[in-house]
Amino acid sequence: MKSEVKIHGRDFTGYRIGGAIAAVVLGILLIWQIWLLFDGDSRTIPEVRWGAALINGEATQDDPSSILADEVLRARTQLQDERFRSGPSPAGDMSPLASGSGQWLTEAPVEDGYGIKLTESWARLDSDTAPLLRVSERVVGISSLPYSGSALFERPMARDWRLGIANVATHLGALAILGFSFLLALVLALRGRVPIAKGRSGKTVKRFGFLERANHWMTASGFIGLALTGLVLAYGDTVIRPFGEPLLGDLGWLATWGHVLFFPPFTLGILFMIVRWTWGNLPSRHDGRWLAKAGGFFSDGSDNPPARKFNAGQKIIFWAATLGGVVMVVSGVTLMFPFYWLDIQGMSWAMLIHALLAVLLIALFIGHIYIGTVGMQGAIEAMWNGRVDRNWAEEHHELWLAEIEGRSAQEKGSG
């Protein structure tokens, strides 16, 4: 690796300084996220009091409604406890509300007199009254929302969903996005920008046509819009609320509608990519060698592993974008039209898959954006004007360059 920062008259010092500054900022954010991961907060503790009476603007524990609210909250919190400690579970202790056969709703003797038959009928446990005493697996209320399951308040299975969304997806997403961005910034600070080893030749070759580039930018814009709006929905309470609840409300409203509006261009772009580029992104024997040498990313020499139009790294991005994009679209449409073809358990899985895959794709495409912009000299020109410097093409796509130049020479000879 060359130690000088000036290569062929091009000074890359500014990129390394920028990378160092970004690495420091991202490192601080990463440490903060790791601290949040182990700060011991419990997401099962309700943050808002229910039914507390207010005296001079403050809640009082002496009011009966406050005591009742505390009991309700405590019971609801117990539903979210570990399975081996709370029901419904065979291993858990039986709730005092659970009732066996032959029991009555009251243990007090029924007095003789008027209405004794009606009282006995009400007090005796039968098929109608028994379900009222069972420990319910969910609590259903009344809702005006126009879809099935909207009135469902609690499900013991939801503790698994909450663990996946609140702990795994949230923390994994933050660690993946911040961690990968930190590593890229550190690489830029220590390694610097990947140069064109032989310098610019002054000659260019056509790499992508107008339709391919237009589709690329449409898909990229759609994904960035989806990513930003999704991050607001996922992390707005933590990141944006400290700057004011009105700001969170405005951005949350924009993100809610924007997330839906960015979906069509992303979907169309993914479908076009599948049709146009699948054949060129099939695995080949050159991919293993390219991966073994990391594509020459850590070397300033021109002897990079050979590749056709798409190298192994670009193929990874392609398959992640297409396969992951299809899953994101299907799960996203499922969430847009809840309970049309899935029950509430299926909806929970759709949301969990959508969230986990989203944060992983964001982290992966941050690397793609880095390589295509500040990480490699001459790379962005492929999708900016469709033409790349010949030396760049020779260093990174040697087989593809030989193929198009051979074809051009053949066409000239035949003409």
Image: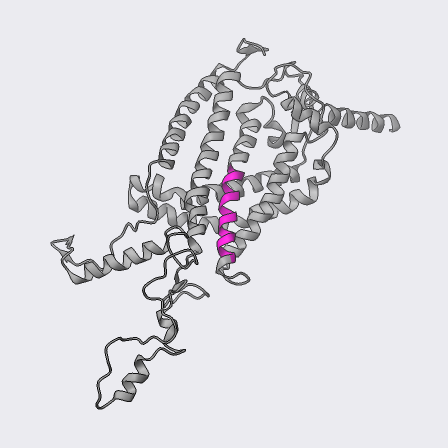
The residue at the point 70 percent across, 29 percent down is 287
Can residue 336 be seen? no
Q: Is residue 350 magenta-colored?
A: yes
The residue at the point 38 percent across, 29 percent down is 31
- Could you say which quadrant of the image residue 202 lies in? top right
Q: Is the magenta stretch mostly helix, strand or loop?
A: helix
Image color mode: one colour
Judge whether 249 appears above or below 2 on screen.
below
**Residue furthest left as drawn:** 56
Which residues, given as a range, are shown in magenta?
A: 346-362
Can residue 159 be seen? yes
- Could you say which quadrant of the image residue 91 lies in? bottom left
The x and y percentages for residue 412 are 84, 26
Q: Is residue 364 magenta-colored?
A: no
The residue at the point 87 percent across, 25 percent down is 413
**Is 19 or 173 nearer to us in this picture?**
173
The x and y percentages for residue 235 are 39, 42
**Is 48 or 85 nearer to us in this picture?**
85
